[in-house]
Image (cartoon, rainbow, N blue to C red):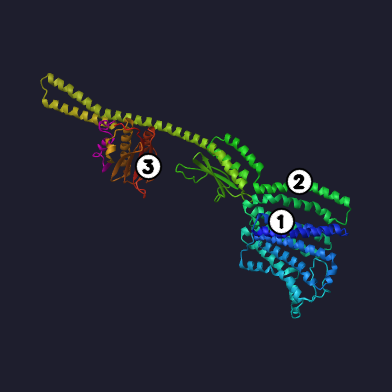
Amino acid sequence: MDRRWVCLATLGPIGVAALVYIVVVRGFIEADADHGLAWPILGALPLFVLGMWLLTVTRSLTAVLIALAATAILVGSAYETFLQRNIEIMAEPWFPLFNLIGLTADSVATSAFLIVFATFPDGVVEHRWQRIAVAFLWAPLLMGPLTLLTTSHVVMSPWIGISGDAIPNPYVVPWLEWAAPIVTVLFFQSWPAVIVGLAVLGTRALFGTPEVRTRTRVMAITVAAAAAAFAIWPFLPWPEVGQYLVYGALIALPIAAVHGIFKYGAFDVAPGDRGRNAARSANLLITVFYAIAVATPAILLAGRIRVVPAVIITTLVAVALLPVRTWVQRWIHRRLFGDRERQLELLGELGASLEEAGEPRDLLTRLTEAVRDGLGATWVRIRLVTDDGDLAASPMGAAGDVDGASEPVLSADLVRGDETLGRIEVGPRHHGEYNDAERMLLRTVAGQAAASVANVRLTAQLAAQLVELTASRERLVAAQDDERRRLERDLHDGIQQNVVAQIAGLRLARNRLQRGELMPAELGELQDQARETLTDLRELAQGIHPPVLSDNGLVAAVESGVARYPIPLSVEADAAVRGERYADDVETTAYYVVREALANTAKHANATRASVALARSNGHLRISITDDGRGIGASATDAAATASASHGGLANIRDRVAALRGTVRVAPADTSGHGTTVLVDLPVGDRVG
């Protein structure tokens, strides 16, 4: 069976019974108007309620210690009440044994509370000497047995107000009486243990690690205030002022403990338990503290005012504290489940915010700001998925101090269908940790925003593709103009001049023929010139569209230029590819791509060999042009290489391939970065021949 439920079933009834006995006797049976309910109601009850509540939300040993200590205080107070109403039992010979109840109750309360304070918030200390000191804090438990064995009279608790000096102790061991002064100094009122416990807590709060100092600061201040109130109480000229200070400090202790729970997870209360189990007990805890606060004026003023003013004061306090009670309930609710109103407002505003955003960065920035405000996060960033499928290194949208951000503590993917678009990453909260409701809210926001992110991203992609398409068309037109001007130059500077020379030669031959001076050799020269012109025309036509491409296919056309290539060139293609014919536009584009890539290699790569590989797979013609040169863009000072990588030949290749819905990828030929491989993928569809 769980230890905490055993303790709850044991300590709960004992504490409740002791409290009921005290209230009935002091509040209803005793005739004295100053019934002394302030200590059990204002001092012990808040701690008892805190201890019982902790047993319902955590399995921590510290919760058991708090419940044990608070129960011991109530038992000690009940013992005091019983003794004051039955003073005659002090004459009984068995009274020294019975008195151990009061001494043990005080000792248990002292030791348990000191250990809780010294090891706050999680029951662990950092240094060996502190662990030894914590073990010493159990020493007050020896006070009852040791005083019974060493002191000749009965030692009474100083809080009872009755001296036992005149009551003989028949259980004393004579040969141990010499130790009575030592026992009194070390254990009576437990001041050595109190000093040790405060020293452990003080050194941790002042000299511990930054995290320890932060987590223990509030409790250390509260405990120091309570210790100071107890210390100065007997010396104040107005005892009632000291009494009020003590009660205020004791009420502050459970408040400091609750603060540690919600902010730092004190007493090992896990985030899930804070939301799931604490919600069941928080309202009861608030109700009890509200009742205590309402009853406080009447308890403290008992014996000084009449019944009617007491009722009026109690009513006014109850009405005045209602807003405080509501605020505390809402504060705890926000700590457990987050600010639901703000979260619902976030979801409502998010849609309108996303509709107003047009650009991707504007949309993502609005989204991060909304998430940061809704969750109370220190920073939020959104990283989108790149073309490689990885998250981008730099965020597209950010809110808060993202530059100094570390790893996110919370994240949610932006998923549209089966595609992951990016991820929302959230930093730590300004206060506390994220609960289950806030995690669910982030997932809801991510799901709601994914569609908008996808639409805006698609719009941006379409705009980029439109820009690229426009640029591609402009490059194709420019390339066609360049090709036309090159043809004009070749025709004007070469073939046209040859034809003009041949016309002039024919005119001269006609004149010489009329005069009977024409020689056969002159006609042979004209015939040779005509053959040269025909050869030039064939070479020019082959540059535009080689006949071998139309007659024998792509592989044969590529191989036809091997002999004329300035460096060793090999062409690899299996029999199926060699025997297959493709659509005219596919063969023309493929031939142009190979020719342009090889021209770039010859001009810029400084290669010693090159190769062309052609293969067909899954309805695609894949062409690989590889060289062993220095690699494209390998030299930042090589203007030709840089130009070919950014525009010119490679840009023309990409434009031609894109027109057939193909792809081009340029990569190093090996892992060292040397050489270049141009990979072209063209959809070929059905077989032509």
Disc number placed over residue 666 in the picture, else none: 3
User: Which of the marked residues, 2 or 1, is nearer the chain's N terminus?
Assistant: 1
Give the x, y percent position of residue 242.
Answer: 80, 61
Compared with residue 216, is residue 139 higher up or lower down, i.e. above or below? Answer: below
- Please indicate whether residue 555 sits to the left or right of residue 199 in the image: left
Per the image, label 3 sits on a secondary structure element best described as strand
Question: Is residue 167 found inside the magenta-colored segment of the image?
Answer: no
- Please indicate whether residue 273 sits to the left or right of residue 17 in the image: left
The magenta segment is 545-571
Depth check, mark 3 against mark 1: the one in front is 1
Q: Nearer the viewer, residue 126 or 147?
A: 147
Question: Is residue 567 found inside the magenta-colored segment of the image?
Answer: yes
Q: Quarter holding the N terminus?
A: bottom right
Name the amino acid type tagged 2: Pro
Check the image and name the residue furthest to the bottom: 175
Give the x, y percent position of residue 319.
Answer: 80, 46
* Picture quadrant of residue 351: top right
> How far apart are the alpha carbons under marks 3 and 2?
71 Å
Q: Quarter holding the C terminus?
A: top left
- Please rate how many residues cluster around mark 3, counting C-alpha atoms within 10 Å: few if below 14, some from 14 to 19, many from 20: some
Check the image and name the residue furthest to the top: 514
Residue pictured at 27% horizontal, 39% vertical: 575
Name the amino acid type tagged 3: Val
Disc number placed over residue 323 in the picture, else none: 2
Q: Which residue is mark 1?
A: 50
Per the image, label 2 sits on a secondary structure element best described as helix
Q: Is residue 43 visible?
A: no
Give the x, y percent position of residue 439.
Answer: 59, 46
